[in-house]
Amino acid sequence: MDFMKTPTSSAPPSDTALQVMRVAERLAQTRGFNGFSYADIAVELGITKASLHYHFATKAQLGCALIISYRERFNAGLAEIEARFDAMRRLRSYIQLYDKVLLSDRMCLCGMLAAEYSTLPAVMQRELRLFFDANEQWLERNLEQGRAAGRVKFRGPALEFARTLTATLEGAMLLARSYQEPGRFAATARHLLQEMDAAISTEGQSAAAAGKRKSR
Amino acid sequence: MDFMKTPTSSAPPSDTALQVMRVAERLAQTRGFNGFSYADIAVELGITKASLHYHFATKAQLGCALIISYRERFNAGLAEIEARFDAMRRLRSYIQLYDKVLLSDRMCLCGMLAAEYSTLPAVMQRELRLFFDANEQWLERNLEQGRAAGRVKFRGPALEFARTLTATLEGAMLLARSYQEPGRFAATARHLLQEMDAAISTEGQSAAAAGKRKSR
DNA sequence: GTCTATAACGAGATAGAC
DNA sequence: GTCTATCTCGTTATAGAC
């Protein structure tokens, strides 16, 4: 965990720094990285902007710390899930990670930053891609294992399906926040899990075409 | 077609206003609504910021004009598609609308604005939702028709699948832009179309679980 | 319609005292 | 570590001449 001023620093963040990050993370998730300022954080914590700059000299450094922290917690969550459940429950738990974020009225930090990608400092862009890389590797691995075990079904390469899955979850979060209905995300989550569950028959998906598996 | 200063105005936009919108739209799609300023537009068009304010008194009005214009063009595209093709080709064409945007190095305007939703003026928030509403109604209608005709297959209510579809496309665009690979979106698009195509067998999706029902 | 000029404010960031 | 004070720049927006 190196959140701090330089990528090579290893000093543990102070109490104040952690509070700054806590507030900044929420603001970044709800308003975007370009949607909040040091003044917003300072007011909420009852300190001055100058004090913030002591802990995070530039906003880019704060942004990097946010991504690294978020990614590490996410990866820790994934590791925990992977150690515990079988294939379908892992995927269910994966989706619940996203659901939990949305239920706290936030967008995924990295999904939000992805929208702002072209305006972000290069250092943040790099850290951001690492989040999605880790996501897709975890999913690819577990999808492949689940399919081999006969518990998960999907078509094509696991990597491509992993990317589709992440895209759907990020997109569903994004759109759900424009409405005031958490059910929008939940419905999509349910749909995804049903489609992947090898224990659920695929018969009768198509009302009229049901009888036409002959075509081949 | 009312892009202009008030929601009830109906004067056609002047040549300059159209140029302003053309530039502003591109900036909003690539950098976000909070990621560009009147100065950016002014420099690019070789006029002054003050002139911009003559055409669009406030940035919120410019933003509304952008959404309405974008939505109307999108709806026109959807109407054209609906008049011409059969079910699967309609869905393919729908996805191509998104692909075309991404290939011009842009994010969907409304997907981008959805990320910034909580920071947008209320008038823009309202116009934005109308875009997604129109999208989901078009998709719901055409998915249902396609399923009834036996050409499209999917599980559950058409409305829910429509929302999942839009979420996947918006999410895939969002993530594709953090990498420099348009193939990321294309792969997801291909995957979606394969899954929906009733003419494609669903056998063998699950390597191990599929030992049964082998009509191949 | 477009301009110059400027208001009014907020942004990120720094210097230096305590 | 936190403060006051300040700097510089960019932002939206307006007044008024041409």
Image (tube, coloured by chain):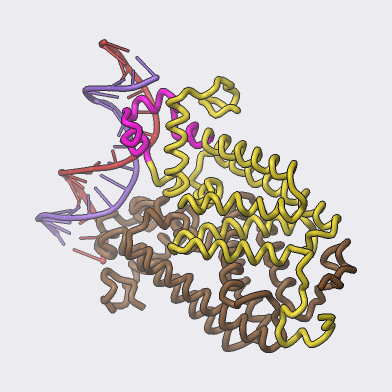
Chain colours: A brown, B yellow, C purple, D red
Along the line of sight, the residue nearer the viewer: A71 or A138 = A138
Q: Is residue B196 magenta?
A: no
Residue sitting at 32 percent across and 28 percent down?
B47
Residue A200's place in the image compared with B1, above or below, is below
Q: From where the camera sits, is residue A104 visible?
A: no
In reply to whether residue B53 is colored magenta, the answer given is: yes
| Residue B140 visible, this angle | yes
Residue shown at the point (60%, 23%) measured from the top left: B8
Q: Position of residue A96 (x, y in %)?
A: 62, 71
Task: Give the residue at x 51% y 39%.
Answer: B121
The quarter in which the N terminus of chain B is drawn is top right
Q: Which residues are magenta?
A: B37-64
| Apparent side of residue A207 relative to residue A158 in the rendered image (left or right) | right
Coordinates of residue B65 in the picture (x, y in percent): 53, 33
Residue reaching furthest to the front: A216
* Majority secondary structure of magenta residues: helix
Q: Quadrant of the C terminus of chain B?
A: bottom right
Closest to the observer, A53 or B129: B129
Left or right, B115 with reference to B197 = left
- Say left or right for B147 vs B189: right
Vertically, is B188 above or below A38? below
Q: Quadrant of residue B54?
A: top left
Q: Position of residue B15 (x, y in %)?
A: 46, 24
Q: Position of residue B148 (x, y in %)?
A: 86, 56
Foreground residue, A69 or A211? A211
Residue appearing at x 31%, y 31% in the figure? B46
Report the front residue among B61 and A23.
B61
Residue B3 to residue B71: above or below? above
